[in-house]
Amino acid sequence: MGRSLFERLGGNAAVTSVVEDFVARCAGDSRINKKFGRTDIPRLKSMLIDQVTEASGGPRRYTGRDMKTTHDGMKVTTGEFNALVEDLVATLNRFGVGKAEQDELLAILGPLKSDIVEVESTVTGTPLPNSYRSAPALTTAKS
């Protein structure tokens, strides 16, 4: 049997580096960064690492909210979703991820679009509605 996508991506260290770069890229992208205005960034990074790791066949499990619940009320537009995908592809290119692996990852994540996009529009840079409630912050257990 061939290596999993997770292994071909480079394992945990590579997925973590890609997520770090991707989140920073999104933060600097005026087409989408308003949607992250009230986001707990450490939580976002942790959840993305878990989600990409699990989706690509790695050992971590995603335990966050489903994408429909997470994005409900954010009023994400098709344009914003597409901008986010462009940012992801730019990050994957920066890390030298091969086309086959990119296509495989995008094929796994692409179907989430219907759970994320609420506004069919090419507009980008829309504000996060005041009514949107972000996920609770991560709690770190002290031992």
Image (cartoon, grey):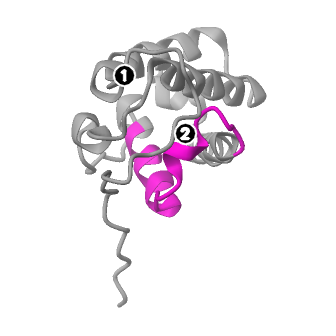
Name which quarter of the figure residue 123 lies in: top right
Q: Residues within 10 Å of mark 1 (few under 14, many from 20)?
A: some
Query: Of the residues shown, which amino acid type is indicated by label 1?
Result: Val
* Between 92 and 5, the one nearer to me in the picture: 92
What amino acid does circle 2 point to? Gly
Q: Position of residue 62 (x, y in %)?
A: 30, 46
102 to 37, vertically: above or below: above
* Residue at the bottom extreme, as displayed: 143
Q: Earlier in the sequence, mark 1 or mark 2?
A: 2
Magenta span: predominant SS is helix
Labelled pair 1, 2 in contact (Cβ < 8 Å): no
Quadrant of image for the N terminus: top left
Q: Secondary structure at mark 2?
A: helix
Q: Residues within 10 Å of mark 2 (few under 14, many from 20)?
A: some
List the residue tagged with mark 2. 11
| Towards the viewer: 8 or 92 | 92
Picture coordinates of residue 121 (x, y %)? 45, 15
* Residue that appears at 63% across and 21% down: 86
Q: Position of residue 77 (x, y in %)?
A: 44, 24
Question: Residue 98 placed where, x, y %?
Answer: 67, 15
Q: Residue at x 40, y 22 (%)?
A: 109
Can you say which quadrant of the picture contains the C terminus? bottom left
Q: What whole-number distance in Å separates the C-alpha atoms at marks 1 and 2? A: 35 Å
Q: Is residue 32 magenta?
A: yes
The residue labelled by disc 1 is 119
Q: Nearer the viewer, residue 6 or 92?
A: 92
At horizontal 29% and vertical 44% (from top left) the residue drawn is: 70
Residue 114, placed above or below residue 135:
above
* Magenta span: 28-51
**Magenta stretch: residue 78 in it?**
no
